Structure formats: C-alpha cells, structure tokens
Image (cartoon, helix red, strand yellow):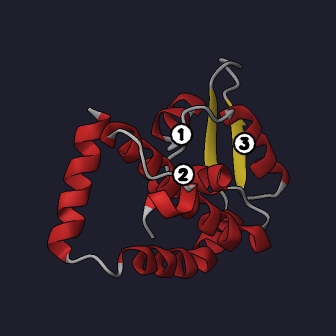
C-alpha cells in the first residue's frame, strides 16, 4: 500500500513522506506484535525484557543493562520488571552487601513462555518481509542503520 493512500495525502515533501512511511510501518508491525502477545498477557516492552534476559544465557542483568538494550528507550524498566516478577517470569535478587545492587534473571516459566511465543513471532517476521529478496532485506537494514546514525 502506498503511504499516500493510507494517509489520504498526495502532496508532501519527500523527506516528510519518508518519515511518515517509517512511522506508519513501525506502527503496523507493532500492532501485529501486540496481537500476537495479547493472549499471553504481555506487552511488546515486557516481551523485549524477557528476550534480553534470555540473551543473558543464565547470567543476571541489572536494570541499566536491560534499559540500555531496550528497543523503546522510553520504557519504565523498573515497572516492566515489577510486572514480570508478579507474573513469575523473572526474579529480582538484591545484593545483601549493597542494597542498591539489583540483579534480574529470567525464570523457567519465562523461558517456557518465550519458547511458546517464538514461533508465531518468527512467522510474523517472515510474513512481513516475504515480498523482499535477500538483497533487498540487506539493503533495507543498511538504510535503516544509516538513518539511526
């Protein structure tokens, strides 16, 4: 779908069109992700925290490390972790010697939930890029990285 059809505007500068196109696409992908995660009572940000912790391969992470790796830097990491603790998906360990030092780990339940979610999320990812060739996917990634630099 052309962005002009989606936003009902045909006359805009190329730069504005590009940014609107990026935002519109990101929101469309986000909406599809929300749809997949909804039955699991997870937000995309909570899902992101779980994947970060799984990537630690059993090693704990502190709140700063999680925040640094978040896709959405605006997320309230403490609140996200608290909700995941309530759901039994992560553990918080406070250092006895230094109460300010807090380490977060993913639980077995969290790992099992991710294993269940992995397949539908991967299928969604493949569906989104199915019309692109491998070369186009590489080019898109290169262009997106240039935009962020």
Which residue is denoted by mark 1 in the rendering? Answer: 61
Q: Is residue 143 above or below residue 118?
A: above
Query: Residue 100's quadrant in the figure?
Result: top right
Marks 2/1: CA distance?
A: 7 Å
Position of residue 29 measured from the top left corner of the image (x, y, whole percent): 53, 63
Could you tell me residue 50's position as x and y percent?
Answer: 60, 55
**Residue placed under numbered mark 3 in the picture:** 80
Q: Is residue 50 left or right of residue 12?
A: right
Q: Nearer the viewer, residue 96 or 13?
A: 13
Is 89 left, or right, of 101 in this rendering?
A: right
Q: Residue at x 40, y 38 (%)?
A: 16
Secondary structure of residue under mark 2: helix
Residue appearing at x 85%, y 51% in the figure: 86
Residue 28 percent coordinates (x, y): 56, 62
Determine the secondary structure under disc 1: loop
Of marks 2 and 3, which one's residue comes earlier in the chain? 2
Quarter residue 6 falls in: bottom right
Residue identifier under label 2: 53
Extreme residue in the front direction: 11
Which quarter of the rendered picture does the C terminus lie within?
Answer: top left
Mark-to-mark CA distance, 3 and 1: 14 Å
Circle 3: element type? helix
């Amino acid at each position: 779908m052309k962005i002009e059809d989606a936003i009902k505007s045909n006359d805009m500068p190329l730069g504005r069109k590009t940014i609107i196109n990026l935002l519109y696409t990101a929101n469309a992908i986000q909406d599809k992700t929300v749809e997949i995660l909804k039955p699991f009572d997870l937000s995309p940000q909570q899902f992101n925290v779980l994947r970060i912790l799984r990537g630690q391969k059993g090693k704990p992470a502190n709140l700063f490390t999680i925040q640094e790796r978040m896709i959405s830097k605006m997320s309230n990491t403490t609140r996200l972790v608290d909700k995941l603790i309530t759901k039994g998906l992560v553990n918080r360990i406070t250092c006895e010697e230094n109460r300010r030092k807090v380490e977060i780990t993913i639980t077995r339940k969290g790992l099992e939930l991710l294993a269940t979610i992995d397949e539908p999320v991967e299928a969604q990812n493949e569906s989104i890029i199915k019309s692109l060739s491998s070369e186009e996917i590489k080019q898109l990634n290169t262009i997106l990285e240039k935009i962020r630099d």
